[in-house]
Amino acid sequence: MDNLIQQLLNGITWGSIYALIALGYTMVYGVLRLINFAHGEVYMMGAMTGYYTARALGLATEPSLGGLALVLVTSMLACGLLGAVIERVAYRPLRGAGRLAPLITAIGVSLFLQNTGQLVFGADPKFFPALLRSEEVWRSGDVAVSNIQLTVLVTAVVLMAGLEFIVQRTRFGRAMRAVSYDAPAAALMGVPVDRVITGTFVLGSMLAAAAGILVGLSNPKIEPLMGLMPGLKAFVAAVLGGIGSVPGAMVGGLLLGVIETLVTGYLSSTYRDAIAFVILVLILLYRPTGLFGQPQTEKV
């Protein structure tokens, strides 16, 4: 039983990171009906920005919560700007070009960021600075919780709660929901559709950057191709929860993290990556709308 509880705790921790990345996919899809396959590379850029920020400020030698917060905020702001640039340069000119052209462009942006990362940062793996000293904060039998796990979980929950507040309680959130429901009608009502879409990219990119920093704390090895697999898994999490649903992305990420960890702990780590795509196939076959998604009709 202790082993099961420990695996569940580990799964929830990793799942919260998947949820942060999945939120970017689901928000962009909600307002544009576009799968932003470059989102995993934004997550990679967040981790790399945190790495170089920590080294430049000398925070690696003095681990502290304040240093972690500074690195987190810097990375989120940098990736928020990156998200705005990607939307303005790559996606906005193709706004009326149908669905295929933006999808191909998203794949192109992903490859561009991967290769740019290798050119600028180098292809060799880097080890994320220890911004917090790892300590055990609670133990009961064989179940243990470290301060790193607690920090990852609390940070993810705070960010997800903040996003939910923005979407449901703010003027920008109302505008985002209006654009998601009917962009042309929202524009006729005076909603600045372009600014809302850019803001959505910024929010999603900031959450992906936060996920990159949290992964750096938990798994210090980072490299320019690190966004590929987590990005695909986060997409699976978004589909599992219901693409376009913010609560669905949160739940889908947590469920995927728990399932992955249980498979690794009780079967084999060989199946860790495969299980996400098995889930994707099953969801597409038996519940294409996901857990929280609603069937949508399209006008033709």
Image (tube, helix red, strand yellow):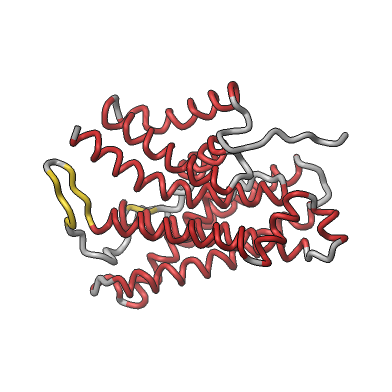
Q: Quadrant of the N terminus?
A: top left
Q: What's the residue at 57%, 57% (across, down)?
A: 204
Residue 132 lies left or right of residue 172; in this view the side is left
Q: What's the residue at 31%, 51% (across, down)?
A: 219
Measured along the vertical axis of the image, is residue 101 above or below residue 126?
above
Specify the farthest residue to the front: 169
Measured along the vertical axis of the image, is residue 136 above or below residue 277?
below
Q: What's the residue at 27%, 57% (across, down)?
A: 148
| Residue 118 can be seen in this image | no
Residue 67 lies, in percent from the top left, at 33, 73
Specify the farthest residue to the bottom: 57
Residue 195 lies, in percent from the top left, at 73, 66
**The one of 56 and 67 positioned closer to us in this rendering:** 67
**The one of 116 and 255 positioned closer to us in this rendering:** 255
Q: What's the residue at 27%, 38% (across, down)?
A: 7
| Residue 71 can be seen in this image | yes
Residue 48 lies, in percent from the top left, at 43, 61
Residue 293 position by quadrant: top right
Residue 49 position by quadrant: bottom left
Residue 125 lies left or right of residue 227; in this view the side is left
Q: Quadrant of the C terminus?
A: top right
